[in-house]
């Protein structure tokens, strides 16, 4: 490599406060080292994970062995490679449940009634938002003021990435306590929604003279934190014939048409409620979006969405995290709230969590400061909906073993007692080299996939 390190431009990916020239020196030293090829092969076998877990073990002869394994972090900011792999696994799982034909799911599921549903949180106060038609904040007249003498109308047309989107028009009017309580109880609200839908379905079948237990709904849901910092749910709901656990899903009896199915989901959403302290009743928001899902090769109406689009849409959201709001993905201490580089809105949410946690009923809420009070799983599904993440990972591991072939030392190494040594790389230069490699690999895969589409 010709030239000095100082001639190389600064690194765009270097964190704030890090000396870019020092990082470049680390990268050049690694690339010029005699062991670079061995180091690179090790990183490549680990899928170019940005924060791999290093394990060590000793064999019976006292020789030391080391391996790297993925961190499996779903957050793109923590590890782009593992995040991308997680999103692809989610896509496979969801698409198998929508379209079938792979991962042990029959292709007949594409003909089952399927809905794409978005359950939102209620309004806790007017916030800056985007409008496709360029209009202002709805429902307010020009010059209308709140009780705090602030105009509750925004005359700006915000872009999607405008930092003002999601911020309250009046922070004093915003119900931060209601916001925090909804985020905390959202998993229970979802559970009650699924129970109510099952009961409503059974009642509808009984009314039609059909077997009330002959059809049941299957779910997959993904949680997204909105720009205002409150969770809402994207879900796929499919109707299947009731079958014993472990059997493949089969088509339900045609006792319900799509309009009836939509109405059942709508009523279950409206009727779901959860009474908590001080006679407060939590519900889902009024904005309920329900679309029917069309299978491959089927041309749907304007209200329909294609199953591949749904799978991609949900897979995109599982890799998002609270880092979009300026919060690290690791647990957060109460003392560190004032030092965070976040908006006033996010800081008020965190402060409200600490305040609500003084109640004995919510004392564990501070353990979830780093998720803005949401304590549920980002992705969950019914057992019968599709394959599992474990099955997908085992299938990939088997494929890699078959592709690599048997290694003479494989049997010996697998019997070793592995222990945790450390996580991550030795320095930031190594990490940036690996991240750049994972980015190139991802771009090459996307380019190849697009080329196949164009040639088809």
Image (cartoon, grey):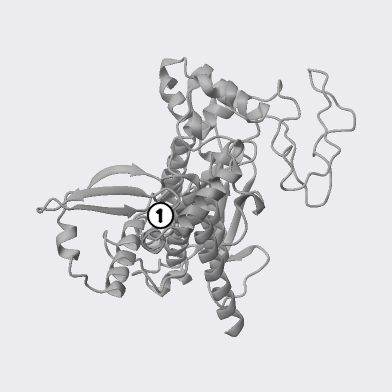
Q: Specify the farthest residue to the right.
A: 142
Q: Position of residue 376 (x, y in %)?
A: 44, 39
Q: Position of residue 58 (x, y in %)?
A: 17, 50
Q: Position of residue 29 (x, y in %)?
A: 48, 53
Residue at point 33% right, 53% down? Answer: 69
Q: Is residue 382 above or below residue 230?
A: below
Taking the image as shown, residue 63 lies to the left or right of residue 103, namely left
Classify mark 1: helix, strand or loop: helix
Number of marks drawn? 1
Disc 1 packing (10 Å; few <14; some 14–19; many ≥20): few
Residue corresponding to mark 1 = 206
Residue at point 59% right, 38% down? Answer: 121
Q: In this orientation, which residue lies closer to the viewer: 450 or 206?
A: 450
Does residue 142 show up?
yes
Taking the image as shown, residue 262 lies to the left or right of residue 94, namely right
Q: Specify the farthest residue to the bottom.
A: 455
Q: In this orientation, which residue lies closer to the viewer: 161 or 190?
A: 161
Q: Quadrant of residue 120?
A: top right
């Amino acid at each position: 490599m010709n030239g000095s390190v100082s001639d190389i431009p600064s690194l765009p990916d270097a964190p704030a406060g890090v000396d870019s020239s020092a990082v470049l020196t680390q990268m050049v030293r690694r690339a010029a080292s005699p062991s670079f090829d061995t180091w690179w092969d090790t990183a490549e076998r680990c899928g170019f994970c940005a924060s791999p877990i290093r394990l060590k073990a000793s064999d019976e002869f006292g020789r030391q062995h080391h391996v790297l394994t993925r961190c499996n972090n779903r957050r793109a900011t923590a590890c782009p490679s593992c995040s991308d792999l997680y999103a692809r696994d989610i896509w496979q799982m969801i698409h198998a449940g929508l379209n079938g034909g792979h991962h042990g799911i029959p292709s007949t599921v594409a003909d089952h009634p399927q809905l794409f549903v978005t359950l939102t949180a209620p309004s806790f106060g007017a916030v800056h938002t985007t409008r496709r038609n360029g209009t202002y904040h709805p429902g307010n007249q020009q010059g209308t003021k709140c009780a705090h003498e602030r105009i509750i109308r925004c005359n700006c047309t915000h872009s999607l990435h405008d930092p003002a989107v999601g911020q309250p028009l009046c922070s004093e009017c915003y119900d931060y306590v209601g916001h925090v309580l909804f985020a905390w109880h959202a998993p229970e609200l979802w559970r009650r929604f699924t129970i109510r839908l099952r009961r409503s379905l059974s009642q509808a079948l009984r009314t039609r003279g059909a077997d009330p237990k002959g059809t049941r709904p299957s779910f997959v849901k993904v949680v997204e934190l909105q720009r205002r910092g409150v969770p809402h749910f994207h879900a796929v709901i499919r109707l299947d014939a009731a079958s014993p656990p472990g059997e493949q899903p089969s088509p339900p009896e045609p006792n319900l048409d799509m309009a009836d199915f939509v109405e059942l989901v709508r009523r279950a959403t409206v009727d779901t409620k959860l009474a908590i302290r001080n006679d407060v009743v939590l519900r889902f928001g009024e904005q309920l979006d329900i679309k029917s899902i069309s299978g491959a090769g089927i041309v749907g109406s304007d209200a329909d969405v294609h199953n591949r689009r749904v799978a991609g849409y949900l897979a995109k959201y599982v890799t998002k995290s609270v880092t979009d709001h300026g919060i690290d993905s690791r647990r957060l201490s109460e003392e560190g709230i004032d030092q965070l580089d976040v908006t006033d809105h996010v800081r008020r949410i965190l402060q409200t969590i600490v305040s609500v946690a003084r109640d004995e009923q919510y004392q564990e809420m501070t353990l979830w400061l780093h998720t803005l009070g949401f304590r549920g799983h980002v992705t969950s599904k019914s057992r019968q909906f599709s394959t599992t993440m474990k099955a997908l990972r085992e299938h990939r591991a088997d494929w890699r073993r078959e592709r690599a072939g048997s290694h003479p030392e494989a049997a010996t190494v697998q019997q070793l007692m592995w222990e945790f040594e450390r996580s991550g790389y030795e320095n930031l230069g190594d990490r940036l080299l690996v991240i750049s490699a994972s980015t190139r690999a991802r771009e090459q895969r996307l380019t190849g996939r697009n080329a196949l589409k164009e040639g088809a």
